[in-house]
């Protein structure tokens, strides 16, 4: 006969092994999903484009942001962190990224959205590099699962340009 401690140990080991196997299967099932998100940003107005007293350029703009990120959600998705970044090159840096807006999408029902907003965070370049500068707006997202590894991706939207002169 086996003792109570031996039986409890065997039962606990089996339960933990099954739980680990279920978590691994849940994580693997996310690799089967092939999402097809879409996003579009329309810059409506450059509210101001000025040189700060310390010599840095600062921009404020009004935008319409629309996205359909519903395909990112599976039964294993806890939430999605999404942010919009302005990306551009300068002689000093090959890639400059400035976050303009962000949000947390808690469920699939909230993953299709349209927002009319000004940039939530300051669009400042350290220097005088923004006049007439072409830039991309990039929608980044990080999918946070209930179990498994976090994944990330982005959509790059090129073709935006800042004014030649300060306003």
Image: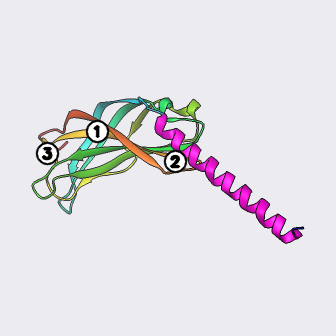
The residue wearing badge 3 is 131
Q: Position of residue 109 (x, y in %)?
A: 58, 30
Prevailing SS of the magenta stretch: helix
Within 10 Å of disc 1 (Cα), the crowding (few <14, some 14-19, many 20+) is: many
Q: Nearer the viewer, residue 25 or 123?
A: 25
User: Residue at the spot x=12%, y=59% of the render?
Assistant: 92
Q: Nearer the viewer, residue 88 or 163?
A: 88
Within 10 Å of disc 3 (Cα), the crowding (few <14, some 14-19, many 20+) is: some
Q: Position of residue 59 (x, y in %)?
A: 26, 46
The residue wearing badge 2 is 144
Q: Quadrant of the C terminus?
A: top left
- Badge 3 marks a residue whose secondary structure is loop
Q: Is residue 9 magenta?
A: yes
Which coloring applies here? rainbow
Residue 29 shown left or right of residue 92 in the figure:
right
Question: Residue 38's image quarter?
Answer: top left
CA separation in Å, label 2 and label 1? 23 Å
Q: Quadrant of the N terminus?
A: bottom right
- Tell me which label, 2 or 1, sits earlier in the chain: 1
Magenta span covers which residues? Answer: 3-32
- Badge 2 marks a residue whose secondary structure is strand
Q: Nearer the viewer, residue 111 or 44?
A: 111
The residue wearing badge 1 is 137
Instruction: Identify whether 5 is placed above or below 90.
Output: below
Residue 94 shown left or right of residue 60 in the figure:
left
């Amino acid at each position: 006969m086996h003792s109570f401690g031996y039986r409890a140990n065997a039962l606990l080991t089996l339960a933990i092994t099954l739980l680990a196997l279920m978590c691994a299967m849940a994580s693997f099932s996310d690799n089967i999903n092939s999402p097809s998100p879409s996003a579009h940003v329309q810059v409506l107005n450059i509210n101001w484009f000025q040189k700060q007293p310390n010599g840095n350029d600062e921009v404020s703009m009004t935008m319409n942001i629309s996205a359909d990120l519903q395909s990112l959600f599976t039964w294993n998705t806890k939430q999605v962190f999404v942010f919009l970044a302005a990306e551009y090159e300068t002689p000093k840096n090959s890639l400059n990224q400035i976050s303009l807006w962000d949000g947390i999408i808690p469920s699939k029902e909230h993953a299709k959205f349209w927002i009319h907003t000004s940039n939530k965070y300051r669009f400042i370049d350290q220097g005088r590099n923004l006049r007439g500068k072409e830039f991309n707006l990039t929608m980044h997202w990080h999918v946070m699962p209930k179990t498994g590894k976090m994944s990330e991706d982005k959509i790059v939207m090129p073709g935006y340009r800042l004014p030649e002169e300060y306003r």
